Image (spheres, rainbow, N blue to C red):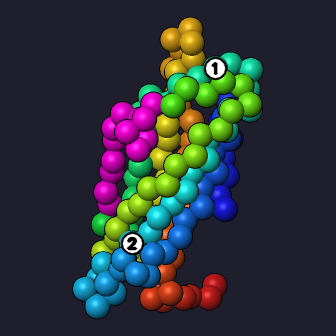
Amino acid sequence: MYRAMTRSINILVEPTYLEDQSEPDQDYYVWAYHVTIENCGQETVRLRSRYWKITDAAGCVHEVRGPGVVGEQPLLHPGEKFEYTSGTPLGAPSGIMFGNYEMETERGEKFEVDIPAFSLDSPHAKRMLH
């Protein structure tokens, strides 16, 4: 599990390789990632948008920007959590993702919350010891 906290917003990410949806012979690898967004602060906030940077082991970079997550812009009161699962395919057996969410307070103040960098590793990735 990967974790980051920005301004009392705790982000937890747990990636899972999806063997049954992947086609390694065709350089197609799929992961799901489960995200928990927890408001540990004293202010109510709304998640307005997301940004992801996804880089595979071959160096291909894909950026994703858009409103909300999974079609929602959740409102989080102090102590509340929002969880969702999404996914991403890669053309290589491993990669890394990170990004941020834009949050907005009830007063209209916008701020970014870091999504921790997390690795996407399949059993097909070559392992290297350092």
Q: Left of 90 or right of it: where is 41? A: right
Picture coordinates of residue 69, whole percent (x, y): 43, 41
Would you place residue 65 above or below residue 85 in this image? above
Q: Nearer the viewer, residue 97 or 30?
A: 30
Picture coordinates of residue 8, whole percent (x, y): 71, 32
Res 24 visible: yes
Q: Nearer the viewer, residue 68 or 125?
A: 68
Q: Left of 61 or right of it: where is 3? A: right
Res 58 visible: no
Query: Residue at the location (68% across, 33% down)?
Result: 80
Of labels 1 and 2, earlier in sequence is: 2
Would you place residue 30 above or below residue 4 in this image? below
The reply to whether the magenta stretch includes residue 64 is yes
| Span highlighted in magenta in the image | 61-73
Identify the element where label 1 is drawn.
Answer: loop
Would you place residue 106 above or below residue 15 in this image? above
Picture coordinates of residue 51, whole percent (x, y): 41, 42
Which residue does the numbered mark 1 point to in the structure image? 44
